[in-house]
Image: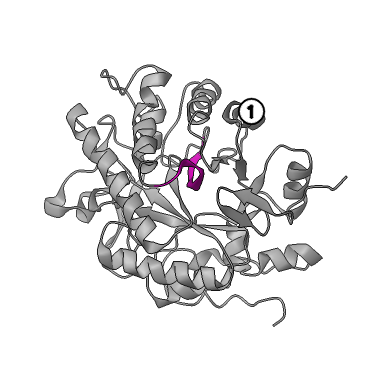
């Protein structure tokens, strides 16, 4: 009897992954001012192509969906052409890569939008904290609540981005429904106080996400589409009164689609707490399950061997260790990540971390 571990191949839709180590989506703020991926982005992803799967940094699906400086988008032809260079480089190294589709919702600022338009959200509730803008930190504003008749346009933004992603040659897409951004804002009752068919019950709060999934699976086969959730993460001033019930239902609804995977941030990254039963969510989903948050080599191996997870996504470890797979295989020492270079800058702290053989 063979034992499944981090290094066991995995069939993910049409892609045979070399291992079950995933490079998590990691915002790095190093695109051009037109939000186009550039040469250093190509090099960064190429260096990490030994991962079983790379999930790109979150990529805005429209100008309305932008909330941070220099994040590479997927809503223009130039951005698509830039991503194609990234994809081609990863494929040349034998890797697989999904793009994460992102609309930040209320976690934005008028300075990112034409005519200083307000950010949009399910309800007009201002998040605590500050937005990261091109001129520094600015207090978040009260967003504009989306009208019911506008939501079809939001869904269309996702569908069009999915088309651009296919044109760029990605192996699949991940719909970002986590971490306090637009789709998560609809899912959780702390930010969704609507009285139409998109608010109130858990079923109604799931409606926009399921419409987005319908739209993107009209472009991509369902087994090339993943979804990311974060049931108890309070990042970006978001919460739910009953995350276990809410996200059991989210998982149950997603289970009917035949998705590539469900990707869960397991815990609250702001407090370190973990109260939700993620195995319950995995079982409600029934398909491949990817875990994320504070996993190291030993914890990841144990979770896979016990059948609690199918894949594990690593974040900061992948920033600092482009050859993380090779290091984990021989249990080699790891480079320490430099948090001062996580967001913005040049090659330093981005493409200059040493490989093991060096």
Image quadrant containing the C terminus? bottom right
Taking the image as shown, residue 11 lies to the left or right of residue 72, namely: right
Q: Tell which of 32 and 342 is nearer to you.
A: 32
Whether 302 is drawn above or below 15: the answer is above
Instruction: Please report the residue visible at 41 percent of the width from the left and 29 percent of the height from the top.
Output: 187
Q: Tell which of 121 and 157 is nearer to you.
A: 157
Indicate the position of residue 49 as horizontal and vertical percent values.
58, 67
Taking the image as shown, residue 233 lies to the left or right of residue 175, namely: right
Instruction: Please report the residue visible at 45 percent of the width from the left and 40 percent of the height from the top.
Output: 178
Indicate the position of residue 308 as horizontal and vertical percent values.
71, 37
> How dense is the environment of label 1, judged by Cα within 10 Å: few (below 14), some, or many (20 and up)?
some
Q: Quadrant of residue 34?
A: bottom left
For label 1, the SS is helix
Whether 213 is drawn above or below 32: the answer is above
Q: Quadrant of residue 355?
A: bottom right
Image quadrant containing the N terminus? top right
Instruction: Please report the residue visible at 56 percent of the width from the left and 47 percent of the height from the top.
Output: 13
Residue under circle 1?
283
Residue 30 visible in the snapshot: no
Indicate the position of residue 103 as horizontal and vertical percent values.
33, 46
Residue 251 visible in the snapshot: yes
Instruction: Please report the residue visible at 29 percent of the width from the left and 36 percent of the height from the top.
Output: 126
**Residue range corresponding to the magenta coloring:** 220-230
Taking the image as shown, residue 172 lies to the left or right of residue 310, namely: left
Q: Residue lying farthest bottom?
A: 358
């Amino acid at each position: 009897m063979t034992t499944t571990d981090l290094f066991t191949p995995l069939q993910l839709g049409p892609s045979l992954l070399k291992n079950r180590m995933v490079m998590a989506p990691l915002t790095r703020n190093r695109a051009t001012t037109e939000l186009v991926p550039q040469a250093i982005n190509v090099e960064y992803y190429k260096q990490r192509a030994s991962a079983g799967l790379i999930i790109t940094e979150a990529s805005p699906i429209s100008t309305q969906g932008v909330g941070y400086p220099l994040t590479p988008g997927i809503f223009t032809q130039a951005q698509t052409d830039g991503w194609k260079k990234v994809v081609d480089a990863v494929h040349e190294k034998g890797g697989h890569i999904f793009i994460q589709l992102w609309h930040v919702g209320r976690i934005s600022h008028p300075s990112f939008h034409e005519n200083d338009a307000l950010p949009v959200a399910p309800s007009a509730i201002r998040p605590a904290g500050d937005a990261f803008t091109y001129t520094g930190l600015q207090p978040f504003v009260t967003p504009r609540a989306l009208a019911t008749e506008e939501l079809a346009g939001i869904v269309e933004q996702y569908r069009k981005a999915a088309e651009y992603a296919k044109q760029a040659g990605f192996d699949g897409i991940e719909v970002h429904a986590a971490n306090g951004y637009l789709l998560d804002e609809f899912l959780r009752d702390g930010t969704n106080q609507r009285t139409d068919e998109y608010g109130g019950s858990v079923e109604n709060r799931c409606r926009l996400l399921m419409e987005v999934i319908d739209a993107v699976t009209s472009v991509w086969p369902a087994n090339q589409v993943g979804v990311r959730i974060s049931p108890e993460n309070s990042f970006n001033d978001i919460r739910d009164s009953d995350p276990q019930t809410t996200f059991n239902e989210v998982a149950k609804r997603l289970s009917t689609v035949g998705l590539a995977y469900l990707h869960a941030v397991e815990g609250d990254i702001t407090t370190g707490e973990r109260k939700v039963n993620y195995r319950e969510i995995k079982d409600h989903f029934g398909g491949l399950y990817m875990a994320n948050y504070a996993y190291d080599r030993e914890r990841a191996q144990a979770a896979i061997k016990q059948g609690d997870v199918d894949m594990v996504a690593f974040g900061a470890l992948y920033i600092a260790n482009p050859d993380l797979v090779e290091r984990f295989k021989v249990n080699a020492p790891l480079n320490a990540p430099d948090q001062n270079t996580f967001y913005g800058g040049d090659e330093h702290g981005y493409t200059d971390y040493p490989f093991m053989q060096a």
